[in-house]
Amino acid sequence: MTKELSLTAQAVCRADLEEICRAGDTALLENCDLSEMDLSDLDLSGWRIVRCNLARTSFNGARLEEATFTACRAAGASFVSANLQEATIEGGDFSNTNFRGATLTQSRISNCKLTGSDFTEAHTLGFSVENVLLVLAVLPRVSFRKMTLKEVDFTEADLRSCDFRGTVFEGCSLRDAHVPECRFEGADLREADLGGIQLTDARLFKGALISTRQAADLLGELGLKVL
């Protein structure tokens, strides 16, 4: 029978975690320092990682299905090609984290900082983000279709070819975001900050809902004045 081991404020190394994995158990890691460790390819499915230091830690290729990260300090961590299906990231700092090619299907990310993080070629079907800082993040071709985005800050983010069709933005920012070839048909953008967006192809916004003020701002980017 699988049991959960609890490691609190302990000095741990990869060998300790490998031993838990070999036994087929899971673990609660709380207030542990795992910074700069190589945890690539480990099976940490279902593990709970709480208030740990994960700065520059490598989880490349790791299995993290249904894992939970709570209030962790993970700036510069790497999850390249990791499987985070149905995982939860709640709180903490994941700035400049690399999620290239990671599986984030049905995962949930909330109340955390992801400034400068890279989601290139990540698999994001059914994932959710709420109250997240994605300033300067790289999110090409991510689908947010028909999602309700609450308090998500995409300021200066690279959103090339993202799908926002039917998306509802609540208290979000797209200020100075890079949006070529994005699709916004049917999106509700009335609560989004659209400052600095270049309206290079108005057809991308066909059927989208915007306010009068937003319309004036977008036209202002074209050098037009609305009186």
Image (spheres, helix red, strand yellow):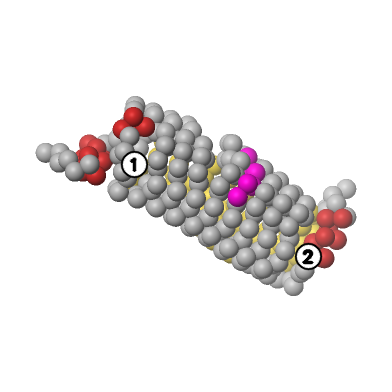
Residue placed furthest toward the left: 227
Mark 2: few/some/many CA within 10 Å (<14, 14-19, 20+): few
Residue 107 in view, yes or no: no
| Numbered tag placed on residue 14 in the rendering | 2
Dot 2 amino acid type: Arg
What residue is pinned by disc 1? 191
Query: How many numbered callouts?
Result: 2
Q: Nearer the viewer, residue 216 or 221?
A: 221
**Residue at left offset 45%, top offset 44%:** 159
**Residue at left offset 19%, top offset 43%:** 223
| Coordinates of residue 120 in the picture (x, y in percent) | 56, 47
Q: Which residues are magenta?
A: 100-105
| Coordinates of residue 196 in the picture (x, y in percent) | 30, 48
Please give left or right for residue 157 compared with residue 31 in the image: left
Q: Nearer the viewer, residue 128 or 176?
A: 176
| Depicted 13 relative to depicted 81: above or below | below
Looking at the rendering, which quadrant does residue 59 occupy? bottom right
**Residue at left offset 35%, top offset 50%:** 176
| Depicted 52 relative to depicted 48: above or below | below
| Numbered tag placed on residue 156 in the rendering | none
